[in-house]
């Protein structure tokens, strides 16, 4: 095995591991070969936000076999920062060589290592990351009656049959308007709280619930009003209260980058009595929007004219959403919500997000703030600016799309080593509280159903929307998808961060892209086997502290085999999976005489401190 010159994940080279709080002393040790003749090593440290550069001379610390050791330390800055560092090595003959993540190179080619420096003075509530989250698309989860849309915002209509296919075809103007509703409601969710409790759910994440003329409600009409098809404020208060009585928290979806054009604030269609920005420059909301030619040309989200973008730096908007005594953030926390999820967080200014966190802390010190970011949130560049989501003053955690992408690749035939590498990058770059507060998921409302993606692979999706709308997997595809989903669920529930179910994934729902991934929950037609597996995993997650907050230790990551341990004090849980089509033998050290698969009850005898297991194809174990 080759010995690296520097390994940022090995405590023999860098300590402490990963992100560090402000003011932490960080030590680094470089180990070049003696034969390379280096006698002078300097660590070059760059600050991203302070635009600083400094050099730390590493002193000669002796030899180790055929290696020469150079060691030094630097103090992390007192303010949150994103640091990049590399090394300059000088040979005895004066030749200069640079060392970066990709090895020896020239100065301009040095790809630097990352060091996240964060403020640890503001605590992160641990209830979210320890528990299990359930994402609900409110219109499609549960209805208690068929609602009458008369008098409600927009020209909406209601499906009479719960199990009908959603409307997916463009209207006469070629637009998909999402005006068909099924009538799911807050009362319906309340009715199924005991079902969620049986699944082990501790956080209910609701997609937008505020008044809107679309079934997805991401084009807000009125932030101060629950959409009447869902219920009213009292219904939300009662849902939060009854959820709390069952040990659950409610997370609301905050869509603050844009509103609907048919909103109280823009009011392009004149649906509200208030004077909207599209009606007059004298509107109190006029400066929330950026018009290029009033009233018909303006900034909008991704060029969609029905989603006019808001200028989040406007004082009146900040007061309305965040700072005011009756602000949107404050009001709904007081109504019973415990958390906010920020839609398209990369389009919200850092200071806007930081203000929301401060107000959440004022209103509810145990409140939680989650951001929607699809990449590594520690170093993301959005709109040509490096972002600060995870420096201790902004979000508590992020949606872990890197987990989803890497898990999907692994489950569909990829190398387990790639999953490990992707997750180690996140673990190294994220502050520990943020890493343990990620929202980990396999399916969301923005992706095709996980069961469809797993069961149909590698077959291409049908080419037309009509075909995709009506496609249902063959029994063979469904069976394979279920086996892979159960295998992926082991990863999901055993990994640090909150395992998250997109409503109905546990019941066998399938479907391609939006809106086919947003069907109605199949009450009475659920896949009971899948439900039992998810309920068991939820119980294990909630009863084993090692799965909630234990250290992560990798045991195997090669080919189709993936195994890691979660350890806390004397409690250990090992997750091992086989995503391949052939049996897989794995051996692990084990502290006791017996290991039990918590999913099946099968026991394994330890011999000389080791257990050997044979994983069937498309399967896995949780050893306790």
Image (tube, rainbow, N blue to C red):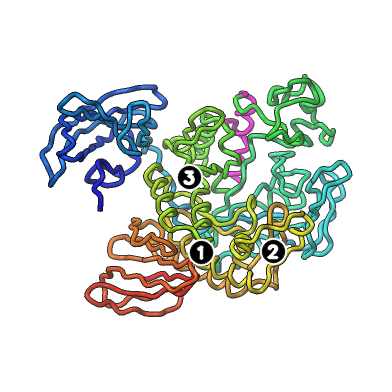
Q: Quadrant of residue 6?
A: top left
Residue corresponding to mark 1:
489
Percent coordinates x, y for residue 527 in the rendering: 63, 72
Asked if the magenta segment contains residue 52, the reply would be no
Residue corresponding to mark 3:
397
Q: Residue at image x 55%, y 69%?
A: 198
CA gap between label 2 and label 1 equals 20 Å
CA gap between label 3 and label 2 equals 28 Å
Q: Residue at image x 87%, y 50%?
A: 150
| Number of numbered tags placed on the structure image | 3
Residue 429 appears in the figure: yes
Query: Is disc 1 placed on a helix, strand or loop?
Result: helix
Query: In the shown orientation, is residue 187 left or right of residue 107?
Result: right
Sooner in the amino-acid sequence: mark 3 or mark 1: 3
Q: Main secondary structure of the magenta part?
A: helix
CA gap between label 3 and label 1 equals 21 Å
With respect to residue 261, does 157 lie above or below? below
With respect to residue 235, does 395 lie above or below? above
Q: Residue furthest right?
A: 172
Query: Is disc 3 placed on a helix, strand or loop?
Result: strand
Sooner in the amino-acid sequence: mark 3 or mark 2: 3
Q: Residue furthest left?
A: 62
Disc number placed over residue 521 in the picture, else none: 2
Disc number placed over residue 391 in the picture, else none: none
Q: Quadrant of residue 312?
A: top right
The span shown in magenta is 314-335
Q: Are marks 3 and 1 in contact (CB under 8 Å)?
A: no
With respect to residue 148, does 82 lie above or below? above
Q: Badge 2: how crowded within 10 Å, few (<14), some, or many (20+)?
A: many
Q: Are marks 3 and 2 in contact (CB under 8 Å)?
A: no
Asked if the magenta segment contains residue 326, the reply would be yes
Query: In the shown orientation, is residue 478 left or right of residue 270?
Result: left
């Amino acid at each position: 095995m080759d010995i690296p010159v520097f390994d940022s994940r090995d405590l023999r080279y860098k300590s402490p591991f990963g992100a560090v709080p402000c003011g932490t002393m960080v030590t680094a040790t470089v180990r070049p070969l003696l034969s390379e003749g280096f006698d002078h090593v300097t660590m070059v440290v760059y600050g991203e936000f302070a635009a600083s550069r400094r050099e730390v001379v590493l002193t000669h610390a002796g030899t180790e076999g055929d290696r020469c050791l150079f060691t030094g330390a630097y103090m992390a800055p007192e303010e949150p920062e994103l640091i990049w560092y590399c090394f300059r090595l000088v040979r005895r003959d004066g030749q200069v060589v640079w060392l970066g993540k990709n090895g020896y190179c020239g100065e301009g080619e040095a790809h630097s290592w990352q060091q996240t420096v964060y403020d640890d003075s503001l605590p992160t509530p641990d209830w979210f990351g320890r528990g299990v989250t359930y994402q609900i698309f409110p219109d499609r989860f549960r209805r208690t009656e068929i609602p009458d849309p008369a008098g409600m915002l927009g020209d909406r209509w209601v499906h009479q049959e719960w199990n009908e296919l959603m409307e997916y075809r463009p209207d006469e103007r070629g637009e998909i308007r999402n005006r068909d509703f099924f009538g799911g409601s807050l009362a319906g969710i309340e009715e199924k709280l005991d079902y969620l409790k049986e699944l082990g759910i501790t956080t209910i994440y609701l997609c937008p619930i505020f008044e809107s003329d679309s079934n997805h409600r991401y084009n807000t009409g009125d932030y101060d009003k629950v959409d009447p098809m869902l219920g009213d404020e009292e219904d939300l208060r009662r849902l939060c209260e009854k959820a709390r009585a069952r040990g659950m928290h409610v997370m609301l979806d905050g869509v603050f980058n844009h509103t609907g054009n048919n909103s109280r604030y823009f009011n392009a269609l004149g649906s509200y009595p208030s004077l909207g920005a599209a009606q007059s420059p004298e509107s109190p909301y006029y400066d929330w929007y950026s018009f290029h030619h009033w009233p018909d040309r303006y900034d909008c989200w991704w060029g969609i004219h029905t989603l006019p973008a808001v200028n989040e730096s406007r004082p009146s908007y900040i007061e309305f959403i965040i700072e005011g005594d009756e602000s949107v953030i404050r009001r709904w926390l007081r109504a019973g919500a415990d958390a906010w999820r920020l839609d398209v967080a990369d389009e919200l200014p850092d200071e806007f997000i930081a203000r929301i966190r401060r107000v959440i802390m004022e209103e509810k010190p145990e409140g939680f703030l989650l951001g929607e970011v699809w990449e590594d949130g520690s170093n993301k560049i959005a709109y040509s600016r490096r972002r600060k989501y995870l420096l201790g003053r902004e979000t508590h955690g992020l949606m872990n799309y890197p987990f989803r992408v890497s898990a999907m690749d692994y489950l569909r035939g990829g190398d387990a080593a790639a999953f490990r590498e992707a997750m180690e990058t996140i673990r190294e770059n994220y502050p520990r509280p943020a890493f343990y507060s990620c929202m980990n998921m396999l399916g969301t409302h923005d992706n095709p159903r996980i069961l469809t993606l797993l069961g149909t692979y590698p077959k291409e999706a049908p080419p037309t929307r009509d075909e995709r709308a009506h496609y249902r997997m063959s029994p063979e595809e469904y069976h394979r998808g279920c086996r892979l989903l159960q295998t992926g669920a082991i990863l999901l529930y055993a990994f640090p961060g909150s395992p998250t179910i997109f409503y109905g994934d546990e019941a066998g729902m399938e479907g391609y892209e939006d809106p086919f991934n947003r069907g109605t929950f199949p009450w009475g037609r659920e896949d009971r086997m899948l439900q039992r597996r998810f309920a068991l995993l939820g119980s294990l997650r909630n009863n084993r502290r090692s799965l909630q907050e234990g250290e992560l230790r990798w045991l195997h990551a090669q080919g189709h085999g993936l195994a890691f341990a979660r350890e806390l004090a004397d409690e250990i849980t090992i997750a091992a999976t086989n995503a391949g089509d052939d049996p897989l033998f794995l051996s692990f050290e084990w502290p006791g005489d017996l290991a039990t698969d918590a999913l099946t009850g099968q026991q394994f005898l330890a011999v000389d401190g080791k257990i050997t297991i044979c994983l069937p194809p498309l399967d896995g174990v949780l050893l306790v």
